[in-house]
Image: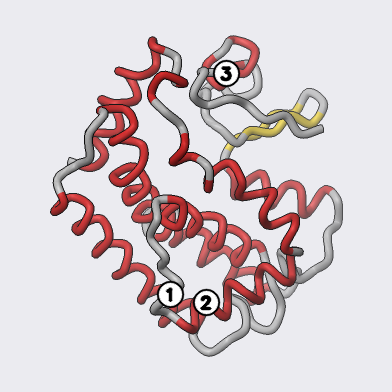
Amino acid sequence: MRKNLSFPSGEHRTEEFRKVNVLMKVPALRDGSFTLAESVAILMYLSRKFKTPDHWYPSDLQKQARVDEYLSWQQAHIRGKGSKLFLTKVLIPILTGQPLPPEKVEGATEELNVVLSQFEEKFLQDKPFIVGNDISLADLVALVELMQPVAAGYNLFEERPKLAEWRRRVEEAVGKQLFQEAHEEILNAKNVSADKIAPELREHFKQQLLKQVN
């Protein structure tokens, strides 16, 4: 059973959720008495438990290594730089009530563009998907993370036709309706206002986020 938590109201910081993930971060999984944090670990666990089609996390040693290679790289690159742009353009202005200086936004955008070029050249190349002809967990994670800068209003696919075609293939493989449902919350994040965030969390979030972009 899936349970959505309200981040602005601090539902991820309750004692009930702490029993699932002591770090009080999402996503987290509870399977009976077993609990697990970190999105990549959760996806791998689910793919093995439910014996999903082999293309998601291939049994072939080298194909599986390619998935692992991308998932290891993306943490500090696609996820890191995409998150930074989202924080810079969306979350921090919501919390502080004013936009950050333009040079901060430009710097975050430039950093993201560097890793997008690396993604195209190293991982995507001229293949339909990251590992080859079939979609894998690597593609799923990649597109999820790229939705953060999209939610911030940066259309990173507009001037990158190779990336745009890859996105189209991933959406078709997943199913457009499921894809939209999965990203609805992040794409609507810019509509959240500061008064919807629990007062005790506002200052905490603001200070933590400002540290990440300074």
Quarter residue 111 falls in: bottom left
Query: How many angstroms separate mark 1 from mark 3 (CA)?
Result: 36 Å
Q: Are marks 2 and 1 in contact (CB under 8 Å)?
A: yes
Q: Label 2, secondary structure: give it.
A: helix
Mark with earlier residue (1, 3): 3
| The quadrant where residue 15 appears | top right
Local secondary structure at mark 1: loop
Marking on residue 11: 3
- Mark 1 residue type: Glu
Left of 132 or right of it: where is 200?
A: left
Q: Are marks 1 and 3 in contact (CB under 8 Å)?
A: no
Quadrant location of the N terminus in the rendered image: top right
- Which residue is denoted by mark 2 in the rendering? 164
- State which mark lies toward you, 2 or 1: 1
Decide: few, some or many residues near mark 2? Use Cα within 10 Å; few <14, some 14-19, many ≥20: some
Relative image position of residue 170 (x, y in whole percent): 65, 70
- Identity of the residue furthest to the bottom in this view: 126
Residue position for label 1: 158
Q: Amino acid at mark 3?
A: Glu
